[in-house]
Image (tube, rainbow, N blue to C red):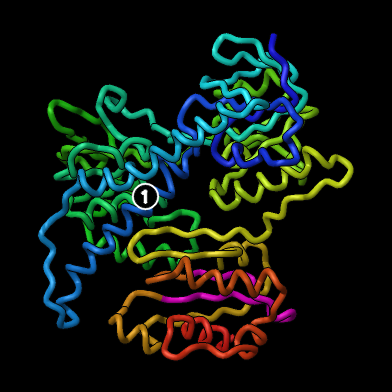
Amino acid sequence: MTHHDLLIIGAGSGNSVIGPEHDGWDIAIAEPWLFGGTCMNRGCIPSKMLVHAADLAMAARHAPALGVHTTFEGVDWPAIRDRIFGRIDPIADAGLAYRHSLDNVTVYESVARFTGDRSFDIGGQAVTADRVVLAAGARSVVPELPGLADSPFHTSDSIMRIDELPEHLVVLGGGFIALEMAHIFHGLGSRVTILHRGDLLLRRADEDIRRRITDIYADRLDLRLETNVDRVQHDGGFRFDLSDGSQLEADTLLVATGRRPNSDRLEVASGGIEVGRGGYVTTDQFLHTSAEGVWALGDITNPAQLKHTANAEARVVAHNLVEPDDLWPIDRSMTPAAVFCHPQIGSVGPTEAELLAEGRPYLRSVRNYSDIAYGWAMEDTTGFVKLLADPETRLLLGAHLLGPQAPTLVQQMIQGMAHGLTVDQMAGGQLYIHPAMPEILEQALLEL
């Protein structure tokens, strides 16, 4: 039996837990897939590199409306794909090689499963550790649909590495992955159909955002709402029997119906690890689990499933491992998020519906991109900013943006919220460059 001072399960944000303060420790990392985790290999980084290419293609289509003579004549998909993964794959390989090169680090390229209290089976080898960090992430949910298991469908794990651009891509789902991938492939020239069982896209977003992005996507591509798939058939191509009695044919299928934490694959119950709703590992404010000496971070414990939250959690765990008498708590009170669809979305804080459900008083301000000069320059007719503030404290409670640069613009609101500035201080305590995009924030703040 092999014993370590620290075992980290997962080499995404878990890999960043290791620092100079652990140089004297015997450390192990168990990672059956690629170093770098979901974000680098099959998530936010390659998808945003694809989004940028799709944005350029969309700009070429839309520029003639501004008097610029551009045309879109298609893309070289293999060149786009290879540019992206030609950069990413060597980074993953280098990360693995670096950890292998360290005298105090052992890398197990296998799945780790609990067999008892901080004891594991890793690729058939018995391993124990004094301390354990669970950072094994999450995976795509695949619904149980007749015929689906027998078809060559894709998830976000594989769709970005396909060999040919789809002629007709069907996307099953209506969340952020579905919207981003639909934008990518439609932008690059594929015909795209989204099949979504709900009446609006992006279930967790603010309702005004949901309504606007649903209308935009309905105008842009084939969006079928309140539609279920009864059966999937594949014989050289896909055929879908839909709940409205119709059929649909396509050459490629992307299943984007959500993600679930990998706690079950680790068999965490055998290690005394409690899980909550959806299988997320339960932790206290210091990210300690129900089992002594076991911490958890990232997608396996946080339903937000965001890289910036996982990185923040990794910093907390790294400190708490070596400073048990000075534990840092994790602060999840202000978790921003973005969706890189087209147009983009940036958000922080509660939605208006959540405030209403809490019975919490609030002030509301909505301003359109078309209200500012730069909005005129872009001829933007769909973008808007929605701010929610406390009427007594004058603090900003939430910000929800849809439009060009929304994930960048919302950062200014996050900074003000993080430093406890009132909406009056944010609006009047600085000069806003004219005619830059942040003027839309100034106008919305002044309205409050």
Crowding near pointer 1: few (<14 within 10 Å), some, many (20+)? many
Viewer-nearest residue: 368 or 112: 112
- Residue occupying image coordinates x 11% and y 68%: 71
> Which residue is label 1 attached to?
47
Q: Determine whether 135 is above or below 404 in the image.
A: above
Question: Residue extending furthest right?
Answer: 325
Question: Where residue 120 sits in the image (x, y, percent)?
Answer: 65, 16
Secondary structure mainly formed by the magenta segment: strand
Disc 1 residue type (three-letter): Ser
Q: In the picture, which quadrant includes the N terminus?
A: top right
- Residue occupying image coordinates x 43% and y 58%: 339
Q: Is residue 388 magenta?
A: yes
| 358 horizontally vs 42: left or right | right
| Quadrant of res 119 | top right
Question: Where residue 102 sits in the image (x, y, percent)?
Answer: 61, 29
Q: In the picture, which quadrant includes the C terminus?
A: bottom right
Q: Determine whether 9 is above or below 208 in the image.
A: above
Instruction: Point out the stretch of residues depicted in magenta.
Output: 384-400
| Quadrant of res 397 | bottom right
- Residue occupying image coordinates x 43% and y 81%: 437
